[in-house]
Amino acid sequence: MKYQMQPGDYLPITFEPITTQYINIVVTEGEMELSDLSMVQCVFPQIHKKLNTADPDLQLVYDAAVSTFRQNTLDIYMDCPCRERAGWLCDSFFTSRSEYCLTGKSTVEYNFLENFLLAEHVDNIPDGMFPMCYPSDFPATSYIPNWAMWLVLELEEYYGRTKDAGLVERFRKRIYQLKDFFKKYENEEGLLESLDAWVFVEWSKCNELVQDVNFPTNMLYASMLDAVSRLYDDKAAAEQAARLREKIRGLSYNGSFFTDRMLRKDGKLIPGGEITETCQYYAFFTKTATPETYPQLWDTILYSFGPERQDKGLYPEIYPSNAFIGNYLRLDLLSQYGKEEQLLKESVGYFKFMAERTGTLWEKISDDASMNHGFASHAAVWLDKICNK
């Protein structure tokens, strides 16, 4: 930050730097007397909800999750306080659960969602599509179609938390415009094919497998249609979701695992054949698969996948998940299906090293990205559900 000042007394205050480890004052011309230097912490108010545990590792992870939430939640949910303060969809699906768990309210979530409703037109975004993050100034002409699907899923959960039928009704027109937007990408099988812009599944090999027909994206699309059917009593949307899931089961499942994609060659769809860990989690998270309908696959991901799989050398041919979003889908599945002891153990495996190093939870399992990411606060939700029941 640079200041050019005439002689006088000044009290400059700025919302930059975002975060800092060291501050160095350099005077390049003239003289300056510095009488005080301080930082104002901009965070969510203190969280008073405690974790009922005597396990220091679980407490460490919980405290890091709470700290992560507080640093990334002000007037809206933020991606991270250090790299960018934009509000991204999908991340918000998880952070919104954190807010309700830790505070019993969805006040920030209302602000966050309403922003997307109020943004009637955003430059460089096609009609019918939601921006991937808002409010923000994003210089690239891009959007994430998957994130718009997560918005619909979050809206349904928001209604479940708040019973705010008013906001749901205000979204009706925009949600159906989104549905119409996706319709033009449906191929002869009813699957979304060759989506434009930034098709995002997760930070892993998955994101190299997003064309032409990406099955995790289509699994998410089916969940979006189901959410539309429940939000707006739309029987046709539910029927479309059921047809879509059945088609995915027939084309993606190879007898052992769900494959990630199909490619268009000479006018025909052919299997890509690649298998990722995260694709399996999408299948179960979106109810394309269930433990009852795919028991062998469920046992495989339950007992052979997880934070120790690569160290044990299990299924080296299957590309591993990253924190965002595969590992979070995995842990959410453990929570959904009551695998409490395993969830506690894996939470320590996934998060303890992060909490020890920074006191926060990260965007990835590596330190080459944000090491304080709002969605990661969701770890507190799982721990609270088990330890405080």
Image (spheres, helix red, strand yellow):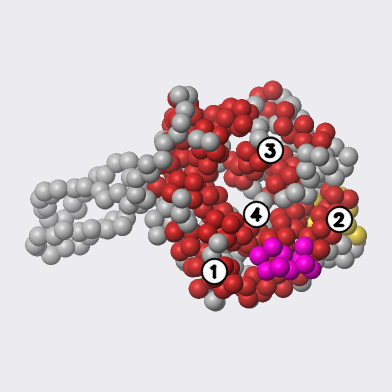
Callout 3: SS? loop
Residues tagged 1 and 3 counted as in contact (Cβ below 8 A):
no
For the residues marked 2 and 4, what is the alpha-carbon distance in whole angstroms?
21 Å
Q: Earlier in the sequence, mark 1 or mark 4?
A: 1
Tell me whether circle 3 and circle 2 mark residues in contact (CB < 8 Å). no
- Residue position for label 1: 167
Segment colored magenta? 229-238
Residue 236 in magenta stretch: yes
Instruction: Looking at the picture, tell me which residue is in the foreground, 302 or 191.
Output: 302
Residue mark closest to the camera, 2 vs 4: 2
Residue 227 magenta-highlighted: no
- For disc 3, the neighbor class at 10 Å (few under 14, some 14 to 19, many from 20) is few
Question: Of discs 1 and 2, which sits in the foreground?
Answer: 1
Q: Give, as a three-letter code, the residue at label 4.
A: Phe
Q: Give the spatial CA distance, label 1 vs label 4.
A: 27 Å
Q: Which residue is mark 2?
A: 247
Q: CA distance from mark 3 to mark 2?
A: 25 Å
**Numbered circle sitting on residue 200:** 4
